[in-house]
Amino acid sequence: MRIALALVVIADLIIRAGDLTAHYTDAGVWPTRLIATFNSRPGSWSLHALNGSFAWVAALFALHFLAAAFLLLGYKTRWATLLVWLLTISLQNRNTYILQGGDDLLRLLLFWGLFLPWQAHYSIDSRNKALPRSSFFAGMGYLLLIASVYFFTVNLKWGSDWHNGTAIYYALSLEQIRLPYFGDWLYQWPSVMRLLTYLTYYTELLIPLLILWPDKRGHFRFLAVLLLLALHTGIGLTLYVGLFFVINMVSAIGLIPRFAMNWLETKLRFLKSQSKRLRLKKNQTLHGIKNTLCVTAIVASMILNLSSLSWFAYELTKEIKYPVHFFRMDQFWGMFSPTVLKEDGWYVYYGIDSLGRQHDLYRNKDYVDFKKPQRIVSMYKTDRWRKLAELMQTPGCTFLRPLYGKYILHKWNLEHPDKKMVTLNLYFMEKENLPNYQTEEINKVLFCVCNDN
């Protein structure tokens, strides 16, 4: 799990680096001067927000990449884990409007990695030193994290879509996230989508029970791993969710029981671990501090998750929320809940030059086409852009629209000096998905009018 998680961090950094200016500098969509104004979480912080220059953010990306490489190799693993975790918090806090549920899980897996003995195998550290034994509370914290993802997501799915079998139909009706090939193929089969809706719901209900069921051999946990892998393989093949499904699959590696790893090691010789079996003598004071931190994190996480349910009345006080936000232990697992989003649509980038001539900035045409593109999902370079576009459609994030429009217009003028535009009218062609492959009449909404100055 350590190796796979490090690879996910590296892949995430590479994907994010392609939009480093757009998402993390003052020349992008979200300049640093706005972070404090719109930050509603007391205690949150970000090294990436200390300076809005490209050079500063690039240097932090390089440090993050190096720490992830150390984590991958298992070299100075504790320090590498700490640095990767802190830089992940900092990066996510720099721009919260491009995050999704997988980012929360990634951050929390790194937190529990601080206490888990994941340098014990397949690492440089395991060859050079004796290793500490696993902490019971750290292991329990990890198990409860994975179980919580599925327990709370299924308990938050109380909407009619999940109980009448239409949830996957509506999810695949969202052309902003439906993938071609397998997603398009599945969308043609309403009866299969209905069956898969119920299978998804009861699989998510079963996974936490299998993870936490007392079983010395680990057969139930292994079944949970198989169900989890099947569930997220289906998500990854049909929906454009970035690294979300990969992070969830990686999170399951730590659940694989010993008997399954023994079988793998006999079939794949390179997996045979050569780590030392010696254990360091416990430092009782340090051990007590670690256990206290683990228990505190478990209790806080459970209260945070329970407070998302309507029947749980208690919430953490402001004083407790401060350290929760500082260490980014906050979490919410309401994926496609309580119902699936019905509002869908696409953006139109209506540019106007100094002579009043129109230009389509997306298609680079001298006329503006309001027709639906063949694939809406192809309009988004990465899932980060898709998430930002989704948030801009919501009433609570209308302030993002002029920032986004201004960035798009400025970027266009830099890249097309012979076709400079003075104004961008950002439209959203809104449609609502209905049962039986029907939609409401498309509504043309002007999101903002932006000038490049």
Image (tube, grey):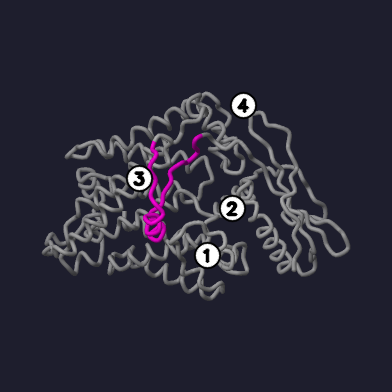
Q: Does the magenta portion include 428?
A: no
Q: Does the magenta portion include 317?
A: yes
Q: Secondary structure at mark 2?
A: helix
Q: Nearer the viewer, mark 1 or mark 4?
A: 4
Q: Are marks 3 and 1 in contact (CB under 8 Å)?
A: no
Residue beneath label 3, please?
303
Residue beneath label 4, please?
435
Residue beneath label 1, please?
17
Residue at 63% x, 38% y is 343
Q: CA distance from mark 1 to mark 4?
A: 40 Å
Please rate how many residues cluster around mark 1, counting C-alpha atoms within 10 Å: few if below 14, some from 14 to 19, many from 20. Answer: some
Tell me the kind of residue under disc 2: Leu
State whether residue 358 is above or below residue 418: above
- Which portion, as a residue range, is magenta? 312-338
- The prevailing secondary structure element of the residues shown in magenta is loop
Tell me the kind of residue under disc 4: Pro
Q: CA distance from mark 4 to mark 3?
A: 37 Å
Residue beneath label 2, please?
388
